[in-house]
Image: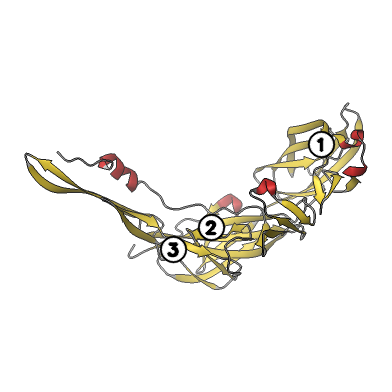
Amino acid sequence: MSKFSRLGASALALVLSIALVSPVTVSAMTDVNKNSGDTYTKTSKETGKTTTWSKGDDEYDDELISGASDFEETYYNHKKERVQVGEYNFLKVPLSYGQVSVSKVKIKSGKDIVAVKVAGYEKYINVRCDEVNEAGTRYIVDPATGKRIKKVADATVDEKLKNYGIVKFRIYGKKIGDAVIQYQVNDVNGNKVAIRKMKISVGDTGVKSVKFAGKEIYADALVYHKANTYFSKKSGKLKVTMNKGYALKRIYVITDPGYEDVTEGNYKHRRPKTVRLDLNGDGDCLDTIDGIEEKEDNNKIYTKVKNGKKIKLGSQPSESAYLKETSTNELDGKEYQSSAESLLVNGLSNTQILIIYQDKLTKKYDYKTVDIFRVLGKK
């Protein structure tokens, strides 16, 4: 009988189930540029602040050379927030030192606009707070405002130990409009410290619509994909429209580089090709641009495009798997060649549109990916 060592029916079934569509991941909106030598510079898109670090063996060995380690923090103190209509939204609001909890949460105005509830909290009692460096100088920094209270070197033990908290609000956007939430801030003993207010703008957040070749393929966060977003054409104009209060920053078209078949012993299998990803064109693949990490062997092609211009869709199938095993076997004293083979090509290319945008109110960056499917060959 045949003696396939590893393949068999189960392995053939497995290869036919392999989906080679990988999700797009974008990290925090901080650009990283590798400098000459063992240093690199980070720039926050949200704050505009820059720091330079020396590179150690790992991230824990890195040393701050210039700037401040909290360069990414916006510290807008959550006086204004924007939430999605028709959804539950969770907001994490840090409190200043000496402020540990909240109570008496109410909607000051706009009860028909939002519903609010405290969903959770964090409390820190007598914890050491000297986390922030600024070019080698350690400071005690207010977690809510970013204010540098005192240099650690000049602080007493009691000044270094702090009480503070973080409140987690659950806010439901009932309808489009503005509301004001009010809450009391308390100290570690539950005594009133202050009254805080937070303006909540409820609307449709982020991307409003995306059109390709004149056809709408995405319409707001509640409707999401339109039906029948399959195309046979190779190219068309791409138009992205943002909701009010959001600024479009960048658009990338992401396609697959294709596949290659390789032979290893008695096995022949298919794998995705890789391409070099150098987004800023500086010759290395050590940077992070628009939240995307450069790589020497990336499995996606990124093309930066302008809004309203023609784009090309991918020409490679988003799913393609092939596996073949050959073996020499013996039966009744006779030698013969056997093979097992499987193939799956879905015949669709998946072009991903990566849309990077900024909330004008909070200055936060975010992103959305929208898929465009192209039928390769005849429908």
Residue 194 in the image: x percent, y percent? 91, 37
Q: Quadrant of residue 155?
A: top right
The reply to whether residue 32 is visible in this rendering is yes
Q: Which one is in front in this view, the residue at disc 3 or the one at disc 1?
A: 3
Residue lying at the far bottom of the rendered structure: 309
Q: Earlier in the sequence, mark 2 or mark 1?
A: 1
Label 2 amino acid?
Val
Q: CA distance from mark 3 to mark 2?
A: 19 Å
Q: Earlier in the sequence, mark 3 or mark 1?
A: 1
Q: Quadrant of residue 169?
A: top right
Label 1 amino acid?
Lys
Q: Which residue is mark 1?
A: 106
Q: Earlier in the sequence, mark 3 or mark 2?
A: 3
Q: Which residue is mark 2?
A: 370
Q: CA distance from mark 2 to mark 1?
A: 38 Å
Residue 94 in the image: x percent, y percent? 79, 41
Give the crowd class for mark 2: few <14, some 14-19, many >=20 residues within 10 Å.
some
Identify the secondary structure beneath mark 2: strand
Q: How is the image coloured?
A: secondary structure
Q: Quadrant of the N terminus?
A: top left
Q: Which residue is mark 3?
A: 257
Q: Residue at x 79, y 31 (%)?
A: 123
CB within 8 Å, label 3 to label 1 = no
Residue 309 in the image: x percent, y percent? 56, 73
Q: Residue at x 61, y 69 (%)?
A: 282
Q: Which one is in front in this view, the residue at disc 2 or the one at disc 1?
A: 2
Identify the secondary structure beneath mark 3: loop
Return the residue nearer the eye: 308 or 319.
319
